[in-house]
Image (cartoon, rainbow, N blue to C red):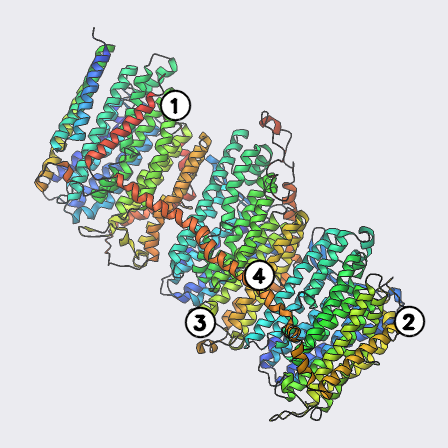
Amino acid sequence: MFSYLFMPIIIVVFTGLLVLLYDVLAVNVRKEHLLFISLAGLIISTLYSAILWGLPFSFMKGMLVSDNFSIIFSVFFLLSSAFILLISYTYLNDNNLNVGEYYALVLFATAGMMFMASTFNLIVLYLGLELLTLPLAILICFKKGRDFSHEASLKFFILSVFSSAFFLFGIAFMFGAAGTINIAQVAGDFSTHAVISLPYLLISAGLLILGLGFKISSVPFHIWTPDVYHGAPTPVTAFLSAGAKVAGFAALIRIFFYLFPGIHLSLTEVFIVLSVITMTLGNIVAIAQRNIKRMLAYSSIAHSGYVLMVLTVFTPASISSAIFYLMVYVIANLGAFGIVLALRQKDREYIDIMHFSGLAWKRPLLAGFMAIFMLSLAGVPPTAGFMGKFYLFSVTVKNGFTGLVIAGLINSVLAAYYYLRIVYLMYMKEEKENVPVTLFPSLGVSLFILGIAAIYFGIFPSPIISLFKTTLFH
Amino acid sequence: MIPIKLYLVLSGVLFVIGTSGVLVRKNVLVMLMSVEIMLNAVNLAFVSFARYMMLPKGQVYVFFSITVAAAEVIVGLAIIISIFHKKESMDVDDMNVLKG
Amino acid sequence: MNSTLLNSVLFVVLFPVFGSLFVGIAGKWLKKPLAGIIASCSVGLSFVISVFTFFSLIKLPPDLRFFDKVFFQWVPVGHFLVNFGFYVDPLSLLMIMVVSSVSFVIHLYSIGYMKDEEHFSRYFSYLNLFVASMLLLVLADNFLLLFMGWEGVGLCSYLLIGFWFHKKSAADAGRKAFIINRIGDFGFLLGILLIYHTFKSLNYNVVFSNAPLILSHGSGIATAITLLLFMGAVGKSAQLPLYVWLPDAMEGPTPVSALIHAATMVTAGVYMVARTHVLYQLSPVSMGVVAFVGIITAFYSASIGMVQFDIKRILAYSTISQLGYMFLGVGVAAYSAGIFHLMSHAFFKALLFLCAGSIMHASAGETDLRKLSGLRKYLPVTFWTMVIGALSLSGFPGTAGFFSKDDILAHAYVTPYYGKFLWGLGIITAALTSFYIFRMIFIVFWGDKQKESHPHESPKIMTFPLIILALLAIIGGYVGLPESNLIHRFLSPVFLGTAVLSSNVELKTIMVSLVFSLGGIATAWYFYLVNPSLPESMKKKAAGLYKLLLNKYFVDEIYERIFVLPGRKLSSFFADVFDAKYIDGAVNETGKWIKTNSEQWRKIHTGYLRNYALIILIGGILLLGFLMTKIH
Amino acid sequence: MTDIPILSIIVFLPLLGAVCVSFIPGQNKPFIKLVAFLFSFITFLLSVSLFFLFNPSVGTFQFMEFVPWISSIGANYSIGIDGISLFLLMLTTFLTSIAILYSFRSIGSKVKEFMIFMLFLNTTMLGVFVSLDMLLFYLFWEAMLIPMYFLIGIWGGERRVYATMKFFLYTMFGSVLMLAAILYIYFMHQKATGISTFDLQSLLAYSTAYLPFKTRLFLFLGFAIAFAIKVPLFPFHTWLPDAYTEAPIPGNLLLAGILVKMGVYGFLRFAIPFFPEVSRDFFYPIGILAVIGIIYGALIAYVQKDMKKLIAYSSFSQVGFIMLGIFSFTDTGMTGGVLQMINHGLSISALFLLVGMLYDRTGKRGINDFGGLSGSMPVFSAFLLITILSSIGLPGLNGFVGEFLILLGVFKVNIALTAIASTGIILSAIYMLWMFQKVSYVTPADREVKKLPDLSLREILILVPIILMMFWLGLYPKPFLSRIEPSVKNLITVTAPGHFVAPVASQFLSDKKIPEKTFLKSLPGK
């Protein structure tokens, strides 16, 4: 039973080890093989996850679970990792980074994310978190010889261990409050009115929010995000924005879906405040950014704010809309980073927003996709971003937070400004500097798929939304 | 029996010391050590809760924590060494190229 | 009347419209006189149809001479329905005959007058459209269609006054005409709205038959409606205070002035008041206003006319003055007298203008009295016809003007309210009128020929119309002889229940006004032929008055100061200050404010690791602190 | 009516065109132009067929189509038209064809992209007019901003980027408020009935009958601000002069001809039927703003030096009439308002086309740069004159009928407002004739202007249909009025006080009763 149900994670971990071993042991290492092996692992794992759909199972009282929620997120992580590998392939070659470790670390981090999404046990969650964080820290400084990446890596590393200490402290208090760190069990205790120490529980909740807030870059725990996104190698930045953040949300949703009934009053207020300041700060500071990676960093902060909006109340509808939004966000964000990766020649990257000037008339298709991604992030129909926002807002109204929705809507107008600026540069400004474009097949295909998805889900969101609306938790 | 609160206060004090270390010290290594103090403070809390509630699984969690701490130190040191190679400096305030 | 003929009334309007379209579009390919001939024919055909209609109409008994022919529904919305239909009755028929006949003559004249013009066909296209609009105005069976013609003539006056578009003064004058007309139309439009609001219809039949039932005599609504309508008439017929466009209208070609002053456009106001007399009858106040505005305008502009030097300008003020008479007429309920004067005025004023055109033709476009003299011998036809016109204008016995003007004055005399005053001012104006017109005649035709000028008589195509009009200016009056008054009898079914005059009073007033107008002629004769130095010395004696009159009471300047300049300033203020600073400013400043904030807030990210840790810590403390407050 | 989904075909044919164009190589400009024009023209022809298929005797929706779309949230692909949208639909297809035909010459660079955006814009605009589902409507409504953003930003004038950004953000700001209102109604409806739906009719019946008054007030404001920005109503017009001035002429046609109509259409289709009482109470605020706009816009137009700016402000001034008519709640006023939308669309696009034709010749568009064109370009001057006359409401041309009906309607409600609004007819004559004089009269000093070639056959062909329409609408508007009026009547019936208060209303409002009309009584005129 065990091996059968947790194969997805195991496959990923073993693929990581296989890649490492292959790189070290094989006589004549072909770099493509590393990619193929990793992709194969990810895809097999994805398929395996898909098979498990609708077969909820829990192992060791929820230390590991496999329910629809975990499967959706696992597939998310697996696919986004696959796209990360696809879009980073020649980047790695050009920077002499194309080694087994890179693939292995990405796969390990993926496994960590999957752990985060598929456990009720907080300590396993902590392990997953660290399994995500440590490979990431290494990946961030993977590109040797750059001040940026070292600084970014150090900041990321110190701050994440700092905040994970708080997270761990939160687990301890949960243990103190309920005598268990199994969230489902704690929730069961609520319903049976067993004695739970409320002060400890609240402290615990606060510290857990801090730890996860760090991962999802909610203000004020977002503070590392811009620097790290800026300093990390671009594929890693994409990975951070797509995978790590979503994993944080997966954990947050699972924890607070269960904890919520007990302490919903205070939590709602906390999430409202976090949501508003997160999206406002993210959007406003993004306006001043001149570096595309920094801009996308702040934009990703703002998007966390939007998702938090719906998490003020943990209803099934809230969760399905949050998942849909995250999916839409990841699609557009991966696409955007993919295009940032395309503006490159060998190891020189062009990440100032001015480098986008006149792109549309040089590479119309590329610019067209960038425009789609930007508009999707801005939430303009008919892109998926609009549907995501629309669904999110409609659920928030349903939850009774119309004021929050208005804040979110006004924020989306602010956001439109800086997303449109990229579009404006691409289409309405003359090219200043000759910016080279390196487009390779795997990147092109990825962009194409992501671009189509960003439109498709904007027009036909129905199937995927109803998928997310099924019973998610076991 | 010594009340649980005192253990928690001790744990809290340790945690604050660790936190302060991260905040005030400029040396990266010392910062890393301060984080270790924080983790140990948590371990103390775990153990005291476990003892107080007579739930041995709390002590098991500490093993997980220690393992993770060890992994953290390894990765952290690796990063610090590679930075030292480059910069010949341990001062964390030297690193503020990325800002804004 | 058979329906074919009634249907054909549509063509009274359609012929000139087609003429206008054809000449306008195909003008490029038409040889010069051809465009003019086509245009003239189209108006001529209108005239023919109206004459036919006239003859079949008078065969009918007087009570049955009213036809409302609907062609199609124009604007149907729910209960609101306005048809495109024509109202054929003695009044409209008389009007279309006058309009089409005079216009036809002017068209003919224009062929000769405009032969050297570059945009010859365009001119005729406009001219045809002008006639068509006026005919539409007259024939309309409802107020909205009337308004269409009403605005249409305003448009055509704009186009024709500004016909010589290269001249800034012409362009300005055209614009002025249109805009001042629009000011009047603004009131007129409100009047129409109020009519619909009151009667739930705009059709003449409905409105007029219901008016006495719905509105009581002297009711406020009746006064409001009629005054608003009159506002339109004031604009269109150039009465005080909206007369200022007409003197400038002489910037257009002279036949155009003839057309505007005689047949189309300015008479529309008088026609409208006569047409809606049922409503005016209900409001004594409005009647009084109409009469007073009329007579004051008459006197006012005649006084200006006395000192002007431009022959066309003198004629323009003369028109304003004569229109004043007509309004006096309709204002004292002497509708048929007003229409009668309208008709005779159409003949002699068209004549006078065409004569003026002939003079200009002869003297290279000169219109200044001070540079014209002694033309009698060179322009015999012009001279004689112009004298006839002038006599008619002065009300010389036996001319059309004599009968029609005195008809009005006699009616004014018997009006119960201030009748004597109206009449008194009327005959004084009559004296002024004879003075200024003969001042012009004497100066232009007597004396010595100017040096270096070679005056010559105009071609036949131009003198022929003069002769026709001169004949009309004389015999036109005989339809309204005091005793047999044909025109009055013809129109009486329309103006049922209006004042009938005893011939006794009429004879009495005729004698008095005759004395005055002959006195005017005599004075002019004395001033300009017998003792030419007298005017100069008079000028010096009454310098203030002279200056006032010469500058037309400074009305243009006053309007400029009160309306135009402040309007411009307000516009500039709105455009450059209010819109730019506040409306735009609000949005742009918000944008700037956000950008400033953006620059400020990003400073939170100092780049120092330890600051970051501190921020996370502070966030955590706040978060925990907040949660702690939830513990009771 | 028929089994052929003709509305869907009309809406999506241009999009298909855009896709086709995107597959043609960019160098093959004539072919791109031809394909784009054919698609827009066929769409136009199809929409003309609607005119004949349309049943003028009923005021409800026709050609309805219904396909489930996002079942989980109750959004459907539900479209249909009534007499109001029919003509806006036709106007859209008409002006798009004209705009594309015009752009053959004036758009020299990036033709392919231009055509793609034009066709895409066409689809979104058509979608707005046919949507009977709130989500679908909003989707089209917002999507429309994208092509417009590009059209202004890429092919616009000197300050195009500023203009397009301002346009996009400002209108988006309004739209999001509307989105909030839509979501709120949706939610309240769901709470009351348990049915999730974005269907226009069901939400409409619900909101007029059951929502508390205060809620309706806020929701109305949400809609009203969005639409007022689009119209634009004073003081929300700041984007307009910039966008109009900077947009390329084909963009102008659609921007001024159709986009601003969407604001009015929004009022007619959503704000008013959803909140009839509130709308009636808002006659004075909106009426006064409209009248201020009429006079304010006219005054500013008078001192403009740039022809496009002058036209922009004139357009701003004229839409005030439309708003006034719509909010009069009388059949004449509202019908006039709808008719005036068409009229304004025609006259304003003709004006922009004419300015564009001058710009194509000289690269200038200041009113002082020209003069005496009556001599050198007589055909141009004639067209310009007719267009100007149409826009200043000369009887016999289209503008008058609409304007008169509006004034007639408003007169019933408030005489003073009518009188003040009517001064607009004087002011419009002042600034329009001023422009005409500057352009067509008085000989210019500039030799070059004297030698300008007159309109080419293509240009005449572009203008003639518009001019003919002006005359048709002015002289025989009956076919139009007869189709608009039933729908307007229907609207008036639906918005009559108490129309939707069903007996079951009490069960939703057991504790809250709809207060009597007390709001805004203190405002002037009441």
In this rendering, which labeled residue sits more in front, label 2 or label 4?
2
In this rendering, which labeled residue sits more in front, label 4 or label 3?
4
Q: Residues within 10 Å of mark 3 (few under 14, many from 20)?
A: some
| Label 2 and label 4 in one chain | no
Q: Residue at x 28, y 38 (%)?
A: A242
Q: Which residue is mark 3?
A: D361
Q: Which residue is mark 1?
A: A264
Quadrant for residue D280, please give it.
Answer: top right
Q: Residues within 10 Å of mark 1 (few under 14, many from 20)?
A: some
| Label 3 and label 2 in one chain | no
Q: Amino acid at mark 3?
A: Arg
Q: CA separation, marks 2 and 1?
A: 105 Å
Q: Amino acid at mark 1?
A: His
Q: Which residue is mark 2?
A: C503
Q: Amino acid at mark 2?
A: Ser
Q: CA separation, marks 2 and 4?
A: 51 Å
**Where residue D68 sits in the image (x, y, percent)?**
50, 40
Q: Which residue is mark 4?
A: D428
**Where residue B93 sits in the image (x, y, percent)?**
15, 38
Q: Is residue A162 left or right of residue D475?
A: left
